[in-house]
Amino acid sequence: MKEEIIAIINKLECNENSSRLRAWAYNLSASRPDDLESAINCLLDALQQTNIQSHSQEGFYYLFLGCAYYEQGDHPNSRDCLLQAINKLSDTEVNNPVAHWLLGVNYSKMKDFPSARRELENALQLLKTNTSLSTPRTEAKNRKQKELKLDIQETLEKFTNEPVG
């Protein structure tokens, strides 16, 4: 997997199952096209299973399929999968912004800089922190969100000097 994608997917909040899926995705590489194609087919097959369609991990399958397509250089399919991931991950406070971040990076590879900026701005908007409560748990959550926000802002700043369209 490309370094920029690994850095982003490292920010995901994963349970045991999605952590295994993420570890598997790390090893995907365009330098091994047969393995990459096989991984894409495995993820597509898994998404066709009726039991995964109602499963809490479905969003992760779409997200990692989007990453695999990104690795393959198939940015339109990557976009479509990441949009599905955003739809399926909508209930998570960190993972949904990470999916928007990935989508923004993907749009930049498609040279669609207005869409890239829009997705990165959406990711930042989703990371609004609530500072009214102060408990160790909320402080840790807010700290993580602030770190994520800085990383996304750094990516967004790269697009401020890019041509539009």
Image (spheres, rainbow, N blue to C red):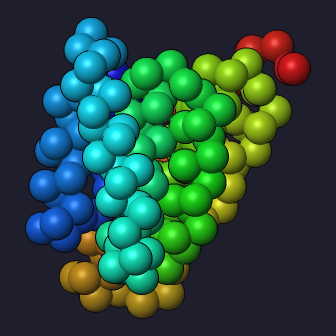
The C terminus sits in image quarter: top right
Asked whether residue 152 appears in the rendered view, the answer is no
User: Residue at horizontal 30%, vertical 27%?
Assistant: 36
Outermost residue to the right: 165
- Image point 26% across, 20% down: which residue? 34
> Is residue 69 shown above or below 120?
above
Q: Point out residue 153 in the picture as x, y percentages from the top left corner.
A: 56, 39
Position of the N terminus by quadrant: top left
**Image quadrant where residue 16 sits:** bottom left
Say which quarter of the image contains residue 144: bottom left
Residue beneath the point at 82% across and 13% down: 163
Q: Position of residue 63 (x, y in %)?
A: 43, 51
Q: Is residue 131 left or right of residue 105?
A: left
The quadrant where residue 53 appears: bottom left
Query: Which of these two is toward me, 121 or 82?
Result: 82
All told, the count of numbered labels is 0
Instruction: Write the residue at 47% across / 42% down.
Output: 66
Question: Is residue 149 rendered to the left or right of residue 5?
Answer: right
- Work out whether residue 58 can be spotted: yes
Q: Residue 99: x percent and y percent?
A: 50, 52
Name the foreground residue: 48 vs 136.
48
